[in-house]
Image (cartoon, helix red, strand yellow):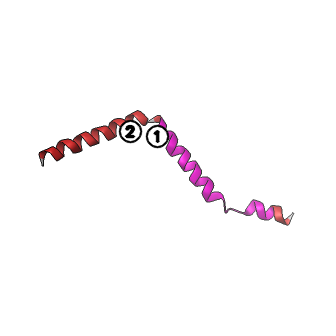
């Protein structure tokens, strides 16, 4: 029974689970807003190219 109590109180894997959950949420947000992110990045690159042409 001592081994089971030690197993229940062990939190060594908690950080890994938290990182995996954060990654899942970020990937989900990217998939949901993929089109908006693509449009934003394209607009930024167009603005950079336009401003670089003025220099």
**Residue farthest along the left direction in this orientation:** 54
Kindly identify which numbered label has been placed on residue 19: none
Q: Which of 16 and 52 is in front in this view?
A: 52
- Count neighbours of disc 2 (C-alpha within 10 A) and say few if under 14, some if 14 to 19, many if 20 or more: few
Q: Is residue 28 left or right of residue 40?
A: right
Q: Give the range drawn in magenta.
A: 5-31
Do residues under tags 1 and 2 come within 8 Å of each other at their CB atoms? yes
Q: Is mark 1 on a helix, strand or loop?
A: helix
**Residue 2 coordinates in the image, percent (x, y):** 84, 66
Using the image, determine if residue 7 lies above or below residue 46.
below
**Residue 26 coordinates in the image, percent (x, y):** 50, 45
Kindly identify which numbered label has been placed on residue 30: 1
Q: Quadrant of residue 9?
A: bottom right
Q: Quadrant of residue 53?
A: top left
Q: Residue at x 80, y 63 (%)?
A: 5
Q: What element carries label 2?
A: helix
Query: Of callouts 1 and 2, which one flags the residue occurring earlier in the amino acid sequence?
Result: 1
Kindly identify which numbered label has been placed on residue 37: 2
**Residue farthest along the top direction in this orientation:** 35
Q: Residue at x 66, y 59 (%)?
A: 13
């Amino acid at each position: 029974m001592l081994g089971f109590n030690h197993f229940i109180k062990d939190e060594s894997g908690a950080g890994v689970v938290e990182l995996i959950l954060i990654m899942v949420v970020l990937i989900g947000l990217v998939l949901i807003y993929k089109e908006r992110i693509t449009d934003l990045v394209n607009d930024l690159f167009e603005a950079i190219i336009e401003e670089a042409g003025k220099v």
